[in-house]
Amino acid sequence: MTCHQKRKIDEIRVEGHEELDAASLREHEEFTKVKNIATIEFGRYEIETWYFSPFPLEYNDCSKLFFCEFCDEIYRSGTLSMFEVDGKKNKVYGQNLCYWAKLFLDRKTLYSDVNLFLFYVLRECDNRGCYMVGYFSKEKHSEESYNLDCILTLPPYQRKGYGKFLIAFPYELSKKEGKVGTPERPLPDLGMLRYRGYWTHVLLDILKKLKGNISIKELSDMIAIKAEDILSTLQGLELIQYRKGQQVICPDPKVLDCHLKAAGRGGLEVDVSKSELLRQKIGVCIS
């Protein structure tokens, strides 16, 4: 699928507009070019929005919206906390979070039924309270092994390593469930770039410490990253060779050092010891 095709699908897959004809769709696109909400107040920040979001009609005359910050904590390490919100138990919160995210994600697809999703909200805490940094969502049951549906870091917190933390956390959840995971496809170009960076760091760190040989399947089981993602990343790093018709990982120390230097910082790490949820490797079926 080309980027152009993906863009057209994302434009059409807006709740309630699947059956629009070409003229109606153009009218809808023209209408949504203009932001309907200018700013939001969230904790200590007043944030200017970037895009239109289809809030209920009663909010059309509101130039600024105020959002609540509280839900269930499942992780705390230093000043960072992660909160889990079940879309079925907290439907209004889940829907509002989706509407709110649409103000900053141009291609986000909105779903009216949030019952099927879990939302993980990252917050930075101080003596005054906890302030939302960003969030990711995931389906409770994904046949494709998707461990992430949507991800967002708020503008005031971008370029601080939080995005990589939000990418890493779903993989820790996958480990807890005894599964391998991957983000929902298709990924936009920027999303693929960020994931490729995360996969690169994880794989290089392991291969740097490795003594002996390891297969892609063994790597996948160890780090909960899908084998196809591991293979494509290693191929991009030119760490795969074909010998006697088989794919072999060739972790030359000098090549690894070169890639690690080029990869830069790895971002904030998830400390599994700080979460009872992540420490317990239990397969849980959440209804």
Image: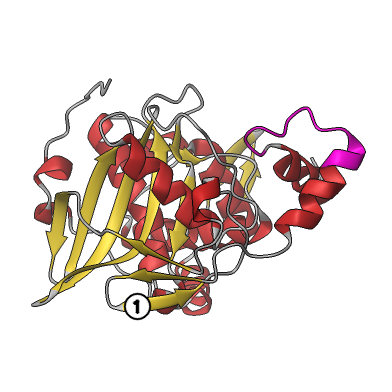
Residue 180: within the magenta? Answer: no
Circle 1: element type = strand
* Residue 10 seen from this side: yes
Q: Residues within 10 Å of mark 1 (few under 14, many from 20)?
A: few
Residue 158: image location, x then y, percent: 44, 75
Picture mark count = 1
Q: Identify the magenta region.
A: 14-24
Main SS, magenta region, reads loop
Residue picked out by circle 1: 45
Residue 238: image location, x then y, percent: 63, 59
Residue 173: image location, x then y, percent: 28, 41
As drawn, is 186 to the left or to the right of 119?
right
Q: Residue, x 65% and y 42% (percent of image)?
A: 186
* Quadrant of image for the C terminus: top left
* Residue 267 seen from this side: no
Residue 199: image location, x then y, percent: 47, 55
Q: Residue, x 28% and y 78% (percent of image)?
A: 44
| Colour scheme | secondary structure
Nearer to the camera, 148 or 267: 148
As drawn, is 130 to the left or to the right of 105?
left
Residue 21: within the magenta? Answer: yes
